[in-house]
Every structure is written in C-alpha cells, then in structure tokens.
C-alpha cells in the first residue's frame, strides 16, 4: 500500500472514531452531570431535614494536594497523542466536531 493511501485511511478512521467518541462523551457527560446534580440536591434536602449529616469539608481531603500528579498525567496523555501522529489529529478533529455539533 502506498503512503498517501495509508495516510488517507488513517485520517478517515481517526475522524470517524473521533466523531463516535465525541458523541458518546457528550451524552455520557450530560447524564453524569444530571445524576450528580440530583445527588447533591438530595443530600442537601436530607441534610436540611436533619436526616443526614454531611461533612462537606472532609470530602476534599486528599484531593487538594494532587496538582503535580494531575499535571504529570496530562503531560503523559499529551505525549501519547503526539506520538500517534496523523490518526490522533483526525481523532481530535472528529471529537471536536462532535462537540460542536452536539451544542
């Protein structure tokens, strides 16, 4: 197989996969967001009726000091995407297009 045909195949495959992943992420993120909002409202309602006690300050213990780990993981993800080349560019393009269409 010649190089232009291989590049075109990678671009098309990456774009299609990116579109599919973009739509799935969009739907899943809306669903998770709605579930988290409902959970928060339920917790606040139960707390206001003195049926439940929530230690809101205790929920963030251990998460505030993880800045370096998050930055390191983001850099590793970026390096992986860069190493994938043309496919990753088409994947990112398809993903971004799916995010735009979904609005």
Image: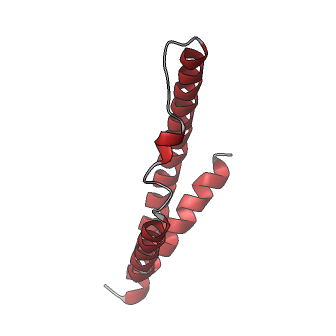
Which residue occupies 50% across, 66% down?
Answer: 67
The reply, left or right, for residue 6 in relation to residue 35 is: left
Find residue 6 and report its horizontal and vertical position in percent. Answer: 38, 80
The N terminus lies in which quarter of the figure?
A: bottom left
Judging from the image, the colouring scheme is secondary structure
Which residue occupies 49% across, 47% down?
Answer: 60
Find residue 91 and report its horizontal and vertical position in percent. Answer: 48, 66
The reply, left or right, for residue 2 in relation to residue 92 is: left
Residue 59 at least partly seen: yes
Pick whichever, 12 or 38, lies toward us: 38
Pick whichever, 57 or 37, lies toward us: 57
The reply, left or right, for residue 62 in relation to residue 19 is: left
**Vertical arrangement, residue 45 with respect to residue 100, above or below:** above
**Vertical arrangement, residue 98 with respect to residue 74, above or below:** above
**Vertical arrangement, residue 5 with respect to residue 90, above or below:** below
Which residue occupies 43% across, 59% down?
Answer: 17
Residue at the bottom extreme of this rendering: 3
Which residue occupies 61% across, 16% down?
Answer: 48
Residue 8 at least partly seen: no
Q: Tally the numbered discs.
A: 0
Find residue 72 and report its horizontal and vertical position in percent. Answer: 43, 74
Find residue 7 and report its horizontal and vertical position in percent. Answer: 43, 81
């Amino acid at each position: 197989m010649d190089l232009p045909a291989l590049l075109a195949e990678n671009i098309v495959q990456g774009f299609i996969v990116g579109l599919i992943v973009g739509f799935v992420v969009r739907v899943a993120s809306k669903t998770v967001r709605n579930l988290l909002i409902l959970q928060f409202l339920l917790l606040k309602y139960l707390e206001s009726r003195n049926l439940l006690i929530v230690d809101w300050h205790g929920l963030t213990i251990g998460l505030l000091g993880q800045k370096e780990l998050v930055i390191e993981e983001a850099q590793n993800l970026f390096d992986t995407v860069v190493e994938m080349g043309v496919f990753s560019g088409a994947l990112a393009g398809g993903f971004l297009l799916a995010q735009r269409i979904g609005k």
